[in-house]
Image (cartoon, coloured by chain):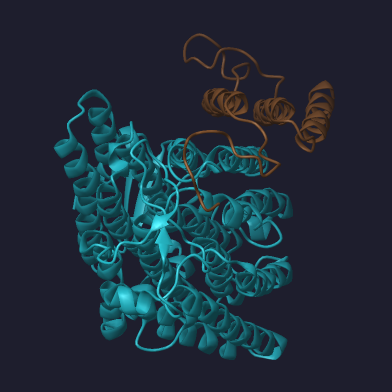
Amino acid sequence: MILPITIGVLVAGGVFLIVQRGMVRIIFGLALLSHAANLLLLATGVSAFRGEPLANVTAVEAAADPLPQAFVLTAIVIALAVTIFMLTLAVIGHNDDTKHMPHTGEFHDR
Amino acid sequence: MNPALLSLFVVLPLTAAALLVVVRRPALDRGLMVGIPALVTAAAIYLLFEHRETPVLAHNIGGFPGGVSIPLVSDTFSALMIAVTSLTTTVTMAFLTRTGEDRYRFVPSLALMLTAGVNGAFLTGDLFNLFVFVEVMLLPSYALIAVTGTWRRLGIGRLFVVVNLLTSTILLIGVGLVYATAGTVNLAELVGRAAEDPRVGLAISVVLLALAIKAAVAPTHGWLPRAYPATSAGIMALFSAVHTKVALYGIYRIYSSTYDGQAPWAPILAIAVVATILIGSYSTFGEHIMRRALAWQMVAGVGHILLGLALFSEFALAAGIFYMIHHIVTMGALLLASGAIEQTYGSGRYERLAGLARRDKWVAVIYAFALLSLVGLPPSTGFFAKIGLLQASADAGGWKQWVFIATVLIAAVATLLAMQRLWSGVFWGPAMENYRPEASHGGRDRRVPLPRDLRVTWQLASPAAFLVGLQLVFFVLAGALIPIALRAADDLMTLQPYVEAVLG
């Protein structure tokens, strides 16, 4: 029961933060959401079985399902990379909600 | 052909991208950036011929048994999609070398990484791998959208990243739910499962919802017309050829194989499709910038393509697939032609441009043919694409028949009127007096009087001309192209060969 409740709390917090205005808050919201997704993926492998999924080391009955673990590993890497990129975007330039142009020396019709 | 070679579609562009990061030679950049997609196009056309004898080619990576392994599968549908998207990508890359954007740091590598992700997404037979390849496609796009275009690119880049990351998270949750309910994410093992078990059906619906947001289906279309025009024309043409199309391919593939017929929520799909077409074509009126108007037309195009799925018969699917081919080529032509004009005169606004029909006759001719195709008037592929959709709608019978036919016709008329505004603003009217030249430090300089001899150069206009010519060839050779679309639709309806090829 703890796992679904945790996922629910993370999703609720993530949605709350995403609908805010600031970019950093949105990034935190997306981080919470991707944590929720990762936990959900882990939950699909039935958390009761948690032995190492290695042949000849763990009995088959006790071994965890390796596939969701592989999923989560991939998803974590992707979320990490995108979060860093978004933080960079949050640092450079602001004012995307207004018509104020940054002084770049360029002139555009937009 | 040995199916193991399918992995080259992903490996080759990725290796080239890695090479270009290490070795920086302008000639090598240009050669590989245009050459690799051209090579992929040739290989995909070869695959199309191959699929006349063997309908499905599947390769289990690493030689693991079917069901455990990660499969790469190619059938007529995926080969057709790779052929058309790579061809458009090749032309777009050539355009990027003409505008000098290939000299921006990492742009050639990023564009090739994008190609690798797109090819992988078309070939994969596994939902989780679809997610991974979509991410491989999106990560370079985040960077590409932020390096080219106007100063708005950074703010818009945030919008694009946030929308796509949120959608990817939903996609990931959907894949997790599919694994929890069905015990597999292999598409061949999921055949018909959503129809048998409503829990799997719900999980698949989450996956399809995520793909629908990525494809910009109403009411979640708003990000596309805001995000795309802020980047440069070449990058926008690249995105328009691949991004929404990968999502649409995924929707076609997953929907038709897992539900094995219509989904229980098919009426909702029909409503969303009609709304997408009408909103997209109507909103084109409100824009005063060429590429923004075209971005709304992309939304309308997404609706037209999904109309085939909403009708769900073999002919309707073929009509939708044919529309997809038409849309990729025509949109590419229009965006590249607009890009050539913007690159030369420094603006895409209707009121800043005028009288181009006298100034650049050939560009006007190219644009006119592309617009005819967009509206659906002959001689163009758009004509056959719209006829196909109308005929498929007429076969459906009942209320669907009237609603869909009315929608397609109203959208065509609305597009015609909106595009007339573009035409009279940009190509007719008095001669232009001033323009913004390219600045030495990037971007644009102050407005100066327009020199008498400034024209859109042939180098800039030729990529668009090539795509318009291609679309005319498709119009003439429609008799040869429609059977391929029908075979692609047959792949989606007859799933037995797919399952046998993947699971062995």
Query: Residue B159 versus residue B259: which sits nearer the camera?
Result: B159
The shade of chain A is: brown
Q: Position of residue A67 (x, y in %)?
A: 54, 28
* Residue B385 picture quarter: bottom left
Q: What residue do we see at 59% from left, 17% from top?
A: A63
Residue lying at 77% horizontally and 35% vertically, measured from the top left: A21
Above-or-below relation of A3 to B311: above
Which residue reaches farthest front? B449
Q: Residue pushed farthest left?
A: B27
Q: How many marks?
A: 0
Foreground pick, A34 / B78: A34
**Residue B244: percent from the left, percent from the top?**
51, 56
In front here: B281 or B208? Answer: B281
Q: Does residue B366 appear to the left or right of B125 in the view shown?
A: left
**Closer-to-camera residue (B459/B500):** B459
Measuring from the top left, give residue B128's x and y in whole percent: 52, 39
The cyan-tinted chain is B
Residue B504 visible at all:
no
Tell which residue pokes out farthest to the top in this image: A57
Q: Is residue B258 above or below residue B105?
A: below
Lateral position of residue B252 relative to residue B19, left or right: right
x and y percentages locating residue B110 in the rendered image: 36, 37
Q: Which residue appears at 33% of the width and 31% of the height? A: B105
Is residue B309 visible in this depiction of the protein? yes
Q: Residue at x 26, y 75 (%)?
A: B469
Instruction: Give the quadrant of residue B175.
Output: top right
